[in-house]
Amino acid sequence: KVINVGDNIGDTIEKIVPDIDCDKKLYLDTLFKYKEIDFDTCISGHNIVLDKQVIDNILKSLF
């Protein structure tokens, strides 16, 4: 199962949190919704193919 998250993941592994142009709460809400979706492969707009763990990694870096 694959999800395309577009630019909601940064361009590189080193900069996994993207520069966001929206309210941080909206971005966090989106990440939490991703966690509810059943997927194992995550496609972003510019990064490599990742797995669901990337969402937790982003959340950890934001808190």
Image (spheres, grey):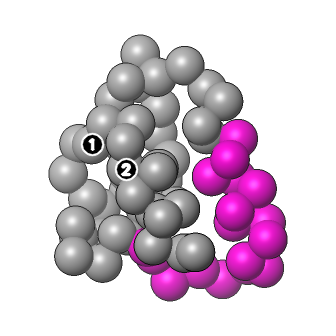
Mark toward the viewer: 2 or 1: 2
28 sits left or right of 58 in the view: right
Asked if the magenta segment contains residue 22, the reply would be: yes
The residue under label 2 is 54
**Which stretch appears magenta?**
17-33
Residue displayed at 50% across by 83% down: 19
Asked if the magenta segment contains residue 21, the reply would be: yes
* Disc 2 from disc 1: Cα separation: 7 Å
Q: Please state which amino acid type lies under the numbered disc 2.
A: Val
Element carrying mark 2: helix
| Image: 59 above or below 30 | below
Element carrying mark 1: strand
Give the image location of residue 49, x and y in percent.
Answer: 23, 42
Question: Is residue 19 shown to the viewer in this render?
Answer: yes
Towards the viewer: 42 or 57: 57
Q: Please state which amino acid type lies under the numbered disc 1.
A: Leu
Towards the viewer: 63 or 13: 63
The residue under label 1 is 50
Q: Do the residues labelled 2 and 1 touch (CB within 8 Å)?
A: yes
Give the image location of residue 22, x and y in percent.
Answer: 73, 78
